[in-house]
Image: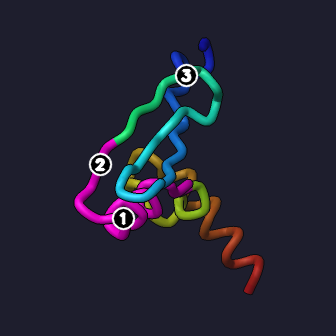
Amino acid sequence: MLRCRLLGHRFRFDADGETMRWRCQRGCGVGGEKRYPTADAAARYARAFDREDREDLGRRAPLVGLLPLRLARALRTRRRS
């Protein structure tokens, strides 16, 4: 799929018993699975990996490379308070 080649895959993770599975949300068919010793461990890893960090992007941005993003976040925060 062209979007995955240009933008990278957008993996979604879920757990089914002791098996953690992942698949590309864009529907290109890429995915896989891994077995863990316990179902709790599989669920814990699936929750940890299945995060979208878009809300934290401006807060955890590198200082120089994403400086405009840091500034935009600071302005939004200042306007809200």
Q: Which portion, as a residue range, is magenta?
A: 34-53
The type of residue carrying mark 3 is Gly
Q: Quadrant of residue 1?
A: top right
Residue closest to the eye, 11 or 14: 14
Mark identifier at residue 29: 3
The residue most toward the bottom is: 81
Residue 47 lies in the magenta-colored region: yes
Residue at 64% over, 59% down: 72
Q: Are marks 1 and 3 in contact (CB under 8 Å)?
A: no
Q: Earlier in the sequence, mark 2 or mark 3?
A: 3
**Could you tell me how far apart the alpha carbons at marks 1 and 2 are, in whole angstroms?**
9 Å
Q: Nearer the viewer, mark 1 or mark 3?
A: 1
Residue 2 coordinates in the image, percent (x, y): 61, 12
Residue 71 coordinates in the image, percent (x, y): 58, 61
Mark identifier at residue 62: none
**Could you tell me how far apart the alpha carbons at marks 2 and 3 are, in whole angstroms?**
20 Å
Vertical relation: 68 (above or below) 32: below
Residue 79 coordinates in the image, percent (x, y): 76, 77
Which color mode does the image show? rainbow
Q: Quadrant of residue 12?
A: top right
Residue at 47% over, 54% down: 16
Q: Which residue is mark 2?
A: 35
